[in-house]
Image: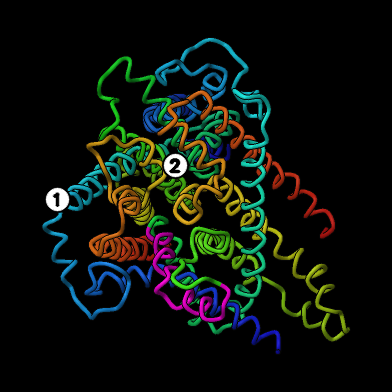
Amino acid sequence: MTETTGAADSLAASPPKIPKRKNTVTIAGILTAGPGLLWLTIFLAVPCLSLVAMALATRGQYGDVVWTFSTENLKRLAGFGLFGWSSDLIFILLRSLVIALVTTILCVSISYPLTFHMATRSKSVRVFWLILIVVPFWTNVVVRTYGWLLVLSPQMPPAKLLAFLGFLPPETALYPGTLAVYLGMVTTFLPFMALPLYASVERLDWSILEAARDLYANGYLIFKKIILPQTMPGLTVGLIVTFVPAMAMFVVTDILGGAKYMLIGNLIQQQFSQARDWPFGAALSLALMLLTLVSLTFRKLKSPDQKGPKE
Amino acid sequence: MKPQTARALISYLSLILLYLPSLAVAVFSVNKARFGLNWKGFTLEWYQRLWNNEYILEATLNSLIIAAVTTVIATVIGTALALGLENAPWPKSCHKLFDVIINIPVVVPDIIMAVALVLAFSFLRQFSGAFELGLGTLILGHVTFQISFVTLIVRSRLATLNRETKEAAIDLFASRFYHFRRVTLPLITPGILAGAMLAFTLSLDDFIISFFIHGPESVTLPIYIFASLKRGLTPETNAISTVMLIATVIMAFIAERLTRRT
């Protein structure tokens, strides 16, 4: 609200003008901000809220939506299908969580050494590294993922080497499978983790680190007591922007995973294409949204706590 | 091994992993072999053939039309939104609500936005045929996520402007519009351009949302590439993918430059 007082102060010389100015500001404000807000409300906010209503509707015979209230989809979310309870859906949800979690952990464990290496370079080299990490972030996810299909195909060195060493039958591709999925996931999300973390690592107070080494603190202690608290802001941002989209991923698992790697994202996509079961798709989206909100609150809970011990 | 060496090793290895897939696509786009992945020599034949592949040409044209149209719409609406939020004395509670709405595309996973758009279009289709899935819905959908990014960039630029110039202008009886045109606008132009470039790149690059809201007649480039994976890869797909990779990287670089000048 500094804005209003600022404008009022400067207009103190001509008091009668103040109310008039104020009014024009509001009308201009509505005229400029209105279209954008209206657009986002119609196409985004309201539809997001209507997911709840849709999740409580049922699928008609021809894949249409029948607006009769039913908790059927919520039951299906809990695993109660046409043929009684099955663990399939629970497994898919758990798998999404596990894959997102493992991807995030892998990205964190690569990002720390990576960002430390980057931060200890000279300034021009640092900018170069930064560009190298940013570029993959911009390139298309479909193209980068199918690039792995080429790299992991039977004719290429990685598969040939493994076949030569006897780990793999000859003329077999390294996809679909766990290795392919994690390669795809980690390379997709590494920039998401490394960039925010780098912002924190760059500002690290290196003198404390040296002091700790002089006092013979071991690596674990240094990380826990010095590096972790100081890089917490970047790390939390990185964790969220990696974990949330990783959970919703369907491109990488679709291309590199095969049927065994069905995630909640793949399932949602199926409800809106092949299966044409929108209400169930909406219920699944709602579940995903809930998981997103939980991860976001984790950040909110984390931030006050992180100020606590410092001050 | 010293920790520095280990760190360097991990860093170089991760760079290799980051670039290997795109590199493979680029390498196979100039490989003579029509089938299979054995190196048969260098050729630019696949790039020439792009001109004769009507599906690829149509998808490219669709992608470019959508990116151009949506960038113009989203930049105008997004900039206006940023100005409206910064310059008008909205009550605090309104600001909070607006912030939530603007941040939805940034926080919520793409797939949920895609589902939300599908629901919105299916509801609106009852009133107008304009919401049949096709180029129109793709444009509406892309603008929806672009607005937020443009607004956020222009707003951060607006926040750096100092109040003094504005107060000086008002003291000198400059009209609000004159002040906006001669002072604010030139100062935030880099931000607007950066927002526009980002919007263009995001639109060109988008797969997940487009995949949900495209019609059979309105295939964009990423959708074409995804579909061609299911049919079996051709060298032409590698060629057009390489063109796309290079185009997005150039766009991203220009956008970066514009934001860094702040």
Q: Residue B161: give x, y in percent of width and height.
A: 46, 52
Q: Depth check: A18 or A50 in front?
A: A50
Q: Secondary structure at mark 2?
A: helix
Q: Depth check: A68 or A6 in front?
A: A68
Q: Is B176 on the left or on the right of A286, as rendered? A: left
Q: Is residue B163 magenta?
A: no
- Residue B127 higher or lower than B40, as above or below: above
> Residue at 61% across / 41% down in the picture?
A92
- Quarter location, residue A113: bottom right
Residue furthest toward the bottom?
B1
Residue type pointed to by label 2: Ser
Q: Nearer the viewer, mark 2 or mark 1?
A: 1
Residue type pointed to by label 1: Glu
> Residue at 80% across / 50% down in the picture?
A305
In the rendered image, the quadrant that contains the N terminus of chain B is bottom right
Callout count = 2
Q: Is residue A147 magenta?
A: yes
Identify the subunit bearing mark 1: B
Residue furthest toward the top?
A68
Part of the protein shown in magenta: A143-167
Badge 2 and badge 1 in a common chain: yes
Q: Is residue A21 visible?
A: no
Q: Residue B22: give x, y in percent of width and height.
A: 38, 68
- Residue bearing mark 1: B54
- Residue bearing mark 2: B148
Q: Secondary structure at mark 1?
A: helix
Q: Residue B5: give x, y in percent of width and height.
A: 64, 87
Sequence-wise, the earlier of marks 2 and 1 is 1
Q: Depth check: A275 or B173 in front?
A: A275
In the rendered image, the quadrant that contains the C terminus of chain B is bottom left
How far apart are labels 2 and 1 at the CA level? 34 Å
Q: Residue B259: give x, y in percent of width and height.
A: 41, 60
